[in-house]
Structure formats: C-alpha cells, structure tokens
C-alpha cells in the first residue's frame, strides 16, 4: 500500500488556474502564488486542476503543464500537492495519473465521470480503480461532488470495502452538504487512516464536529488565514471563537452567493485580495462583472479580510 509522508490534513487550497487576458494558461505567476498561499494565508497544501482550477476546461497538455509548474514551484515550500486527474476519458485520466506520479506529486484525486455516468457503486469503483492503477505509488482520493457530476452514489456506500479494490485509497474530498453521509464515512472507517476532507467552506465547522481531518476549498486561497484561526480555535476547544470565525466567513460567502458566486468570481476576488492577476475564466464561464468585484471588495474591507495584504 502506498503511504504518504503523512496524512493530508488542515487546509488545502483548490488552486485557480491563472490565465492571460487572451484565455491562455499563465504559468508565470504560479511561483508568486505559492509564496502568497504559504506566507499570507498559512496554507501549505494545494489541490490542482479541480473545479476552481477549471481542470475540465483545460486540455491534457495544459493540465500537465499546470500540474508540473505547481509541483516545481511548490517544492520545499508546500507540504502536499494533490493533482485532480478526473476526465470523461479513462485513457486521459490514466495518462494524467501517470504524469502526476512522474513529476512527484503527493497524491491524485478523481471525480466520477459525468457525461456517460456510472449508475452503481461497483461500476464507479471499477473506473476509479483503473485510474488509481496507473499511479500505483500515489495516494488516491475520491472527489465526491454530486451537484456538479450528477453522480449521486453516496460516499458512505462507495467507501465500504474500497481499500480491498483500490489499495492506494487514502481519502475523500466531500463537496456536499449531506452531513449524515459525511459523518457515516468517518464513523465507519475509524480504523483506517483515511483523510476526510470537507469541501463546503461555509459549513466547515459542522464537518469538523463530524470528524473532518481537513478541508479542500476555493475560499482558502484568500480566507485561509481566517479559516486557520477557526481550526486553531476548534483544536483548543474554544467553540465560541470557532463559531465567530465561521460566521464571519459565512457573512462573506452569503453576500457573494446572493450575487452569483462561482469560479469566475473566485478569480476576480483572488486577483483583488492577492494582487496576483488570475485573469479571466475560460468559456463557458464568463468574467465576473465590475459591479460584483466592487461589491466584493467593499464587503471584504468591512469584514477586515483585506488586512493581511493591505
Ligand atoms: C462547487 C465548488 O466549487 N465548491 C468548492 C469546493 O468544492 C467550495 O470551495 C466552494 O467554492 C465554497 O464552499 C463556496 O461555496
Ligand atoms: C473546491 C475544490 O475542491 C475544487 O475546486 O475542486
């Protein structure tokens, strides 16, 4: 069984893929981006080419280049770099898994194929197993995001017996609000050293209570510092401070959600907060409006979320 240096824990930023104004990937700012995450946000793990990274909107060559740049620039700075290698084509997914191993990534993650879909657990596990086998030395994470994939097989069911099928299985990124499912994933796998990574940033505190060992999310790019304060408060059992942090984060996410919040808006916010140009998203996404960016900026200011860079 592959074993990571140590269990993936704490915050994991789902990285944005920086792009030029013409919509090409922009590798040139990734070095700065690593330093920003580590130094300004206290975030030392990343999840590359996922939802936030528009991984499914990039071609295989772009995905390889982006992954390689993050691994190279993160060396000796980041704790772990997990590459999302999910794709509709099993072949592409295997190629990306093998590539992730070759460049020295710390793990791979895969979403369920979402056009021609697996309709039951066994088929999904077979697909994941074929991808995992292309990188037999890398920890493997299943990325559960039913609202986007349309594959609603419960994570608890998927985890039952998974290590017998996928020896490198190391954990789960759970991007859903079903805390019964999440809690049962933790409860039924207490004997195993799995990472239970929660992916709904505005509800992380509830998931910590349920046994989350870490979190992967888009907002840790720019709210990492605040979220780390929450994790620390939770650790020392100061639940009222932890709740204050969560409410503060919720006020921001609630505010932007009402105006339409997704990857495009994340790119705009991160550009604003970090000063690193993230560029526009790629079609079918559209650039966030000027009005959104102005509103988000005012809100970040009023919540004092800009203080770490100002
Ligand atoms: C659908 C989506 O992109 N979810 C992200 C990660 O899974 C989250 O980090 C959200 O962006 C965040 O929770 C804000 O809603
Ligand atoms: C949020 C997340 O995990 C992703 O962008 O894939």
Image (cartoon, helix red, strand yellow):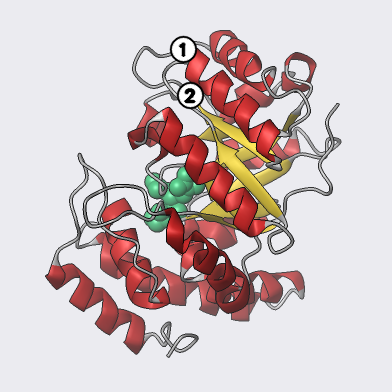
* Residue at which label 2 appears: 112
> On the picture, is 253 further left or further right than 11?
left
- Give the number of the disc on residue 165: none
From what the image shows, is residue 169 above or below residue 5?
above
In this view, the residue farthest toward the front is: 28
* Nearer-the-camera pick, 134 or 143: 134
Q: Is residue 175 visible?
A: no
Label 2: which secondary element: loop
Q: Position of residue 199 (x, y in %)?
A: 52, 49
Q: Quadrant of residue 45?
A: bottom right
Q: Residues within 10 Å of mark 2 (few under 14, many from 20)?
A: many
Observer-nearest of 8 and 160? 8
Query: From this viewpoint, is residue 256 visible?
Result: yes
Of pointers 1 and 2, the one earlier in the residue sequence: 2
**Residue 48 higher or lower than 35, as above or below:** above
Relative to residue 96, is residue 162 drawn left or right? right
* Quadrant of the drawing holding the N terminus: top right
Percent from the top left, x then y, of residue 211? 70, 51
- From the top left corner, tell me how far across and down residue 34 is, in percent: 57, 64
The residue that appears at 67% across and 22% down in the rendered structure is 132
Percent of width and height locating residue 176? 47, 42
Looking at the figure, which quarter contains the C terminus?
A: bottom left
Q: Which residue is mark 1?
A: 118
Using the rendered view, name the quadrant where residue 21 is placed: bottom left
The residue sitting at 74% across, 61% down in the picture is 76
**Can you say whether 122 is above or below 188 in the image?**
above
């Amino acid at each position: 069984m592959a074993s990571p240096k140590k269990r993936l824990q704490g915050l994991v930023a789902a990285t944005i893929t920086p792009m030029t104004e013409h919509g090409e990937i922009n590798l040139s700012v990734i070095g700065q981006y690593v330093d920003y995450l580590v130094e300004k946000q206290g975030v030392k793990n990343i999840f590359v080419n996922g939802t936030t990274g528009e991984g499914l909107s990039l071609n295989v060559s772009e995905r390889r280049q982006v992954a390689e740049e993050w691994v190279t620039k993160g060396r000796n700075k980041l704790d772990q770099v997990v590459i999302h290698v999910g794709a509709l084509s099993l072949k592409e997914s295997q190629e990306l898994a093998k590539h992730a191993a070759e460049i020295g990534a710390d793990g791979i993650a895969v979403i369920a194929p979402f056009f021609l879909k697996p309709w039951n657990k066994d088929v999904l596990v077979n697909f994941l197993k074929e991808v995992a086998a292309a990188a037999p030395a890398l920890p493997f994470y299943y990325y559960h995001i039913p609202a986007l994939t349309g594959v609603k097989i419960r994570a608890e069911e998927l985890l039952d017996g998974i290590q017998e099928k996928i020896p490198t299985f190391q954990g789960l990124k759970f991007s859903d609000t079903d805390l019964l499912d999440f809690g049962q994933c933790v409860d039924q796998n207490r004997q195993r050293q799995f990472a239970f990574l929660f992916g709904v940033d505005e509800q992380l505190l509830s998931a910590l209570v349920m046994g989350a060992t870490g979190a992967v999310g888009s907002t840790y790019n720019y709210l990492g510092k605040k979220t780390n304060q929450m994790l620390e408060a939770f650790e020392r059992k100061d639940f009222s401070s932890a709740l204050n942090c969560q409410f503060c984060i919720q006020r921001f996410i609630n505010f932007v959600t009402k105006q339409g919040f997704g990857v495009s808006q994340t790119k705009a916010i991160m550009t604003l907060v970090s000063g690193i140009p993230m560029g526009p998203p790629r079609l079918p996404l559209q650039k966030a409006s000027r009005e959104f960016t102005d509103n988000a900026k005012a809100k970040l200011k009023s919540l004092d979320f800009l203080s770490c860079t100002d």
